[in-house]
Amino acid sequence: MKKLSSYCVIAFLSFGVLALFWAGYSLGTTTYDFWKNGVEKQAKVISFDHVSGSAKGGNSYYYNLEIDGHIFIEKFPFKLKEKSSYSVLYLLDKQEAILGQSDDGLFKIYTAQIGSKFMALLTIAMFIFMPFGCYKMYSELLSKKDDLWRNEY
């Protein structure tokens, strides 16, 4: 039973690591898409649709936007003024938009996607530290996998 439990801990941590790698890949590819393929357009905020909040304080604000006569709902990590126009980077194939201009760099686009410079730097630091942390975690866990649930105090 102890071996089964220790393998479950390793499997649980492995799925967590895979989820973090997937999140990093997804954020990176979306940022790169906006940087390479994003077209600068003027978006008019027609109306506020709804807000989606979490217990930890991260809110997403959903707005009805009009870009080139098309109306769709897009989320932003901060509040926008209704009936105002904003410069956005628009992906035609995915119909996604973020605040930005065509000459913005990767970090500025990533910051617009995440919501603030602090959170952007924090996530970049996490993704830089993650490979080292994964290596240390697996080297420690796999060498002591049989002793994970022993009480040696």
Image (cartoon, grey):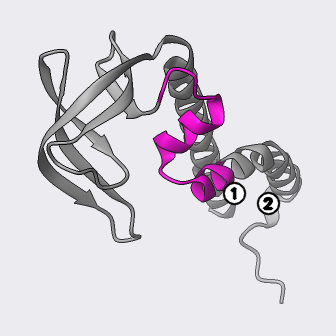
Residue 34: give its label: none
Count of marks, rendered view: 2
Q: Mark 2 points at which residue?
A: 146
Q: Mark 1 points at which residue?
A: 3
Q: 5 left or right of 97? A: right
Q: 10 left or right of 150? A: left
Which residue appears at 86% of the width and 52% of the height?
A: 136
Crowdedness of circle 2 by 10 Å Cα count: few (<14), some, many (20+)?
some
Which stretch appears magenta? 101-123
Disc 2 marks a residue whose amino acid type is Asp
Quadrant into which the C terminus falls: bottom right
Quarter assignment of residue 19: top right
Q: Is residue 64 magenta?
A: no
Magenta stretch, main secondary structure, is: helix
Which badge, 1 or 2, is on the more N-terminal residue?
1
Toward the front, the furthest residue is: 84
Label 2 element class: helix
Quarter assignment of residue 22: top right
Q: Residue 7's spot in the image, x, y percent?
A: 66, 51
Which residue appears at 33% of the width and 11% of the height?
A: 92
Q: Is residue 121 magenta?
A: yes
Q: Is residue 153 above or below residue 145?
A: below
Quarter assignment of residue 119: bottom right
Q: Residue 108's spot in the image, x, y percent?
A: 59, 38
Could you tell me if residue 86 is visible in this image? Answer: yes
Which residue appears at 69% of the width and 57% of the height?
A: 3
Quadrant into which the N terminus falls: bottom right
Q: 95 left or right of 136? A: left
Question: Do callouts 1 and 2 mark residues in contact (Cβ within 8 Å)?
Answer: yes
Q: Residue 120's spot in the image, x, y percent?
A: 61, 49
Could you tell me if residue 7 is visible in this image? Answer: no
Disc 1 marks a residue whose amino acid type is Lys
